Image (cartoon, rainbow, N blue to C red):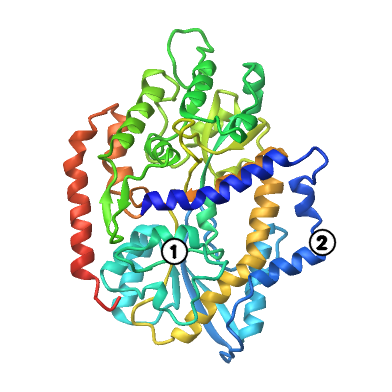
């Protein structure tokens, strides 16, 4: 089914390429289109995202959403007043609009990251009704479902997962045993925050006389080999001491735990795939996965393109960001949340997807590192307000928050050129979720994969037994712990 997921995105992305190729110089620029949409277009878009909820009056009841603080994403779901920040103001307007429509009052229950998982478990076990919904880590979402603590999203009344404000493409990856236990939509901005992209230094591209990288991407020629050739070109012992360290120039900057998944996913591979029964299965034992695995080691370790001292436990290490700002690398691994934080960087940069393995690969594939799905407690006795408000949040977010975040913040404020804005459409239309990179990241990506890459250990066969046990235990939990009714 993972292979089918890749196939499903090809038609969309190919049509996107056609748009890139056919656009003339006189065509409207992305920023201009966003800045001045016609009233007719706006009405059409709003109509597309309308819900079917009808009228509901909850008599001023508090609607409580539990969230946790996290430095890598936008996880606040309410704000007290408009501040001038485009995203925060859109959230404020969304919530006030829904409060008026349904006669409810939004309440945000905020917790520390490390305390949040245990807090949610205690609350559900105590049946204290402390919240209606909670934004959880994807790892907790799976475990809570297996423990029988959350209601599968497909069972929540008023939820219509066929609506366009739910991400139907990504949600295909978020089923297990044919159960849609969680789902993502436009309310879950964190998914966009943690989508990965590749930043390149425009200064170094020019100084090194490298070819137009946007054209390379558009032509379908952006491959591992093409990237590797550019990375090797960029390596330089800037201080001439014969040692390569944080004072020198590199081809690529990234945390060691992020490198393997960045490239196996961009090659269209999955560490955890799914079989014909929608059950998890190991994906690391195929010949193509092994080829991608070894090629990544060769580029980063053998060819010396990667700065090997990068911090392991950080998603996007601060040292790497600072080195990139100082023109000490051609490429930087980044998420869109980080791009928003560094948009004032003096160094000029562009945004592109990660490369394909080779030109035979039909499409680019983009990575969602992890996500925070919205969960509903299994013992909720207020499913009407819960279902109505969650569905309404997805619908209203598509009409207010998503345009503010994607069209205004990402495409207009965070990008430096029209080409990067176009690349965003390509990246976001080709996203996938790999269970080994998300819900099982502690065991696979941040577990044995990160350890192997950090140690330059390429003996993937030695990890096959470990992977087999991970999958076997997961399947055992699914078949034994999940009630048949779910």
* Residue on which disc 1 sits: 373
Residue 93 tag number: none
Q: Where in the figure is residue 263, as x and y percent of width and height? A: 42, 36
| Helix, strand or loop status at disc 2 | loop
Instruction: Give the quadrant of residue 456.
Output: top left
User: How far is the residue under mark 1 from the one under mark 2?
Assistant: 34 Å
8 sits to left or right of 98: left
| Helix, strand or loop status at disc 1 | loop
Q: Where in the figure is residue 372, as x and y percent of width and height? A: 44, 60
Residue 68 in view in this figure = yes
- Asked whether the beta carbons under mark 1 and mark 2 sit within 8 Å of each other, the answer is no
Q: Where in the figure is residue 56, as x and y percent of width and height? A: 58, 89
Classed neighbour count for the residue bearing mark 1: other residues with Cα under 10 Å, few (<14), some (14–19), many (≥20): many
- Residue at the image position 53 percent from the left and 32 percent from the top: 332
State the count of labels: 2
Q: Where in the figure is residue 80, as x and y percent of width and height? A: 64, 70
347 and 357: which is toward the camera: 357
- Residue at the image position 51 percent from the left and 17 percent from the top: 248
108 sits to left or right of 145: right
Instruction: Give the quadrant of residue 53.
Output: bottom right
Quadrant showing the N terminus: bottom left
- Whichever of callouts 1 and 2 sits on the residue coming sooner in the sequence is 2
Instruction: Give the quadrant of residue 163.
Output: bottom right
* Residue on which disc 2 sits: 38
Residue 429 in view in this figure = no
Quadrant showing the C terminus: bottom left
128 sits to left or right of 187: left
- Residue at the image position 37 percent from the left and 76 percent from the top: 377
């Amino acid at each position: 089914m993972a292979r089918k997921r890749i196939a499903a995105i090809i038609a969309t992305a190919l049509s996107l390429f056609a748009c890139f190729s056919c656009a003339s110089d006189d065509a409207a620029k992305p920023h201009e289109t966003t800045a001045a949409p016609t009233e007719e277009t706006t009405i059409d878009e709003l109509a597309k995202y309308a819900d079917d909820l009808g009228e509901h009056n909850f008599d001023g009841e508090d609607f409580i959403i539990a969230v946790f603080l996290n430095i890598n994403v936008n996880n606040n779901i309410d704000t007290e007043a408009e501040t001038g920040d485009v995203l925060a103001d859109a959230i404020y307007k969304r919530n006030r609009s829904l409060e008026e429509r349904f006669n409810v009052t939004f309440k945000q229950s905020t917790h520390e990251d490390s305390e949040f998982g245990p807090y949610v478990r205690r609350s559900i076990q105590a049946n204290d009704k402390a919240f209606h919904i909670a934004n959880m880590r994807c790892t907790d979402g799976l475990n809570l479902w297996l423990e029988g603590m959350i209601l599968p999203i497909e069972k929540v009344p008023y939820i219509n997962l066929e609506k366009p404000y739910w991400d139907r493409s990504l949600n295909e990856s978020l089923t297990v045993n044919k159960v849609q236990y969680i789902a993502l939509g436009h309310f879950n901005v964190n998914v966009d925050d943690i989508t990965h992209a590749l930043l390149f230094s425009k200064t170094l591209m020019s100084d090194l006389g490298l070819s137009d990288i946007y054209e390379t991407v558009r032509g379908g020629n952006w491959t591992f080999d093409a990237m590797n050739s550019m990375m090797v070109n960029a390596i330089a012992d800037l201080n001439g001491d014969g040692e390569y360290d944080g004072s020198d120039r590199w081809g690529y900057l990234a945390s060691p735990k992020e490198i393997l998944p960045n490239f196996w996913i961009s090659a269209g591979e999955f560490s955890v795939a799914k079989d014909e029964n929608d059950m998890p299965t190991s994906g690391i034992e195929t010949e193509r996965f092994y080829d991608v695995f070894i090629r990544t080691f060769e580029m980063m370790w053998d060819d010396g393109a990667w700065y090997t001292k990068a911090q392991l436990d950080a998603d996007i290490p601060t040292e790497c960001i600072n080195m990139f700002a100082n023109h000490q690398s051609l490429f930087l691994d980044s998420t869109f949340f980080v791009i928003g934080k560094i948009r004032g960087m003096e160094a000029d940069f562009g945004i592109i997807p990660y490369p394909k393995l080779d030109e035979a690969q039909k499409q680019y594939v983009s990575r969602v590192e992890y996500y925070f799905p919205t969960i509903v407690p299994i013992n909720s006795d207020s499913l009407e307000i819960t279902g109505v408000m969650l569905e309404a949040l997805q619908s209203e977010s598509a009409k207010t928050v998503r345009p503010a975040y994607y069209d205004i913040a990402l495409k207009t404020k965070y990008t430096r050129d029209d080409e990067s804005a176009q690349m965003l459409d390509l990246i976001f239309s080709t996203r996938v979720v790999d269970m080994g990179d998300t819900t099982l990241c502690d065991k696979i990506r941040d577990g044995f994969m990160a350890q192997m890459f950090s140690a330059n250990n390429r003996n993937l066969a030695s990890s096959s037994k470990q992977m087999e046990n991970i999958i076997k235990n997961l399947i055992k939990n699914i078949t034994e712990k999940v009630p048949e009714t779910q």
